[in-house]
Amino acid sequence: MPIFVVHRHKARNLHWDLRLEMKNRAGRKVLKSWAVPKEPPKAKGVKRLAIQVEDHDFSYRKFEGTIKEGYGKGTVKIWDSGMYKPVSCKRNKMVFTLSGKKMKGDYVLLKFRGRNWLLFKK
């Protein structure tokens, strides 16, 4: 079963990075990533903007520490992690079940414009 991780990233602006293990076009494991400006939803009815960012190397799943310079400069800590089960994956909508300590249950990522997605718990 693939993994997920949510990093709490205190950069210029505090945000959370949702990362889902997937394979890229070359068949290599990567972490598909979305920056979430507010704490990810743990309850139904809470919706969050999730901005898709570049894929991260799979080794980043365990990263915690300080990025000292450049893009993303700041402190990164694992906020939640666990396994996830893809339920459905379409071009503009992904449904998956998370089994983390904080995020549990069925979640949806719904694309609505450019790199912007909506993240919510079903």
Image: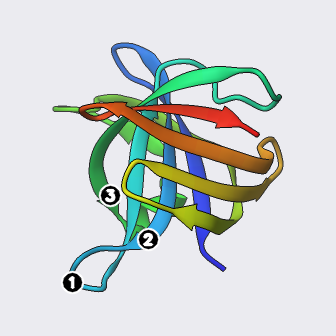
Front residue of 42 and 60: 42
Q: Position of residue 17 (x, y in %)?
A: 48, 38
In the image, residue 77 sits, relative to residue 1, either above or below, namely above
Estimate how packed mark 1 is, as few (under 14), some (14 to 19) or many (20 or more) residues with alpha carbons within 10 Å.
few
Q: Nearer the viewer, mark 2 or mark 3?
A: 2
In the shown orientation, is residue 119 left or right of residue 43?
A: left
Residue at 44% across, 60% down:
90
Residue at 57% across, 34% down:
119
User: What amino acid does circle 2 point to?
Assistant: Met
Q: Nearer the viewer, mark 1 or mark 3?
A: 1
Q: Position of residue 15 (x, y in %)?
A: 48, 23
Q: Are marks 2 and 3 in contact (CB under 8 Å)?
A: no
Mark 1–mark 3 distance (CA, rounded to whole Å): 14 Å
* Extreme-bottom residue of the structure: 27
Residue at the spot of label 1:
26
Q: Which mark is residue 80?
A: none
In the shown orientation, is residue 11 left or right of residue 36?
A: left
Residue at the spot of label 2:
22
Residue 64 appearing in the image: no
Q: Secondary structure at mark 2?
A: strand
Front residue of 85 and 62: 85
Mark 2–mark 1 distance (CA, rounded to whole Å): 11 Å
User: What amino acid does circle 1 point to?
Assistant: Ala
In the image, residue 94 sits, relative to residue 13, either above or below, namely below
Residue at the spot of label 3:
56
Front residue of 65 and 118: 118
Badge 1 or badge 3: first in the primary sequence: 1
User: What amino acid does circle 3 point to?
Assistant: His
Q: Quadrant of residue 71?
A: top left
Q: Position of residue 12 (x, y in %)?
A: 33, 14
Residue 37 appearing in the image: yes
Mark 2–mark 3 distance (CA, rounded to whole Å): 11 Å
